[in-house]
Amino acid sequence: MNYWPLAGIAIVVIGFALRFNPLLVVVSAALATGVLAGLDLVAVIEALGKAFNDNRYISVTWIILPVIGLLERYGLQQRARSVIEGMRGATMGKLLVAYLAFRQIASALGMKDIGGHPQAVRPLVAPMAEAAAVKTHGDLPDAQRDEVKAMAAATDNIGLFFGEDIFFAIASILLIQGVFEAAGYPLTPLELSVWAIPTAIFAFAIHSWRILAFDRRLGRGQR
C-alpha cells in the first residue's frame, strides 16, 4: 500500500499549526496528494478548477459579508433597535418566538439560508431582541445583554436544526435514510420528513417556553 498520498494530511496539519494562509495550505495539500498518488499535475489542477467552477455559488458568501458590514457601518443595528422601540407591546420573548416560527417554517420549505447568524442574527435579530428587553425591563447589565444575544443565536440554531429535516430533499435526510437502510430499515425520504414534524413541533414548544421564561427572568437578576 502506498502511504505517500497521506502526506497531504501532514501538510494541512503543519500549515495550520504555523498559521500559513489557509487557502495556500489546502491547495498545496491537494496538489501533493494528487501528484504522490501518481496523477498528472495538469489533471490535478483541472480537477481543482472543475470543483471550484461546479461550486462557485459558494463564493457569493464573500459578496454578502461586505454588504452586511457596510449596512452595519451605516446604522443597520441602530435602525433595528429604533424600530422595536417604536412598536407597542413588543417584547424580547414575542420577537424571538416569532423568529423561531419563521426560521422553522422557512427551513421546512427548503429555504434554510434565509436566516443565519451573519446575515440575520447579528445585524437584525440580536439588536432587536436586546432593544425589546431594555424597553420592557429597563437598562440591563452587560452579562444579561450577552445572554439575550446568546438566546437570539440559539433560537436561530434550533429553528434551522429542527426545521430543515422536514424538507425531504436535504443532505441530513439522505444521511439518515442511508443509515436506516444499512441497518435493514428501508425508508423513503418523505417518510422520514413526515416523522420529523412532531419533533419540530415539540422543539418549537419547548424552546418557546424557554424564551418566554428567560424573558420573565430578565431584570430580576436571576439566571
Image (cartoon, rainbow, N blue to C red):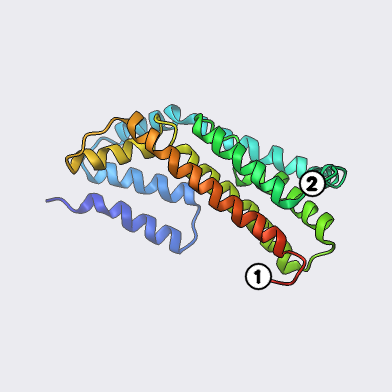
Using the rendered image of the protein, determine whether residue 90 is visible from the camera's viewpoint. yes
Residue 48: x and y in percent read 38, 34
Residue type at the position of mark 1: Arg
In the displayed orientation, state which residue is furthest to the bottom: 221
- SS for dot 2: loop
Tell me, for residue 135, which label it has, or none.
Answer: none
- SS for dot 1: loop
Does residue 221 sit above or below 176 in this rendering?
below
Residue 82: x and y in percent read 86, 45
Figure quadrant of the C terminus: bottom right
Label 2 to label 1: alpha-carbon separation: 22 Å
In the displayed orientation, state which residue is furthest to the left: 1
Does residue 48 sit above or below 80 in this rendering?
above
In the picture of the structure, the residue carrying the numbered disc 1 is 223
In the picture of the structure, the residue carrying the numbered disc 2 is 90
- Picture residue at 41% right of the left edge, 48% below the top: 26
Displayed quadrant of residue 222: bottom right
108 relative to 216 in the view: left or right: left
- Picture residue at 70% right of the left edge, 51% below the top: 93
181 relative to 79 in the view: left or right: left
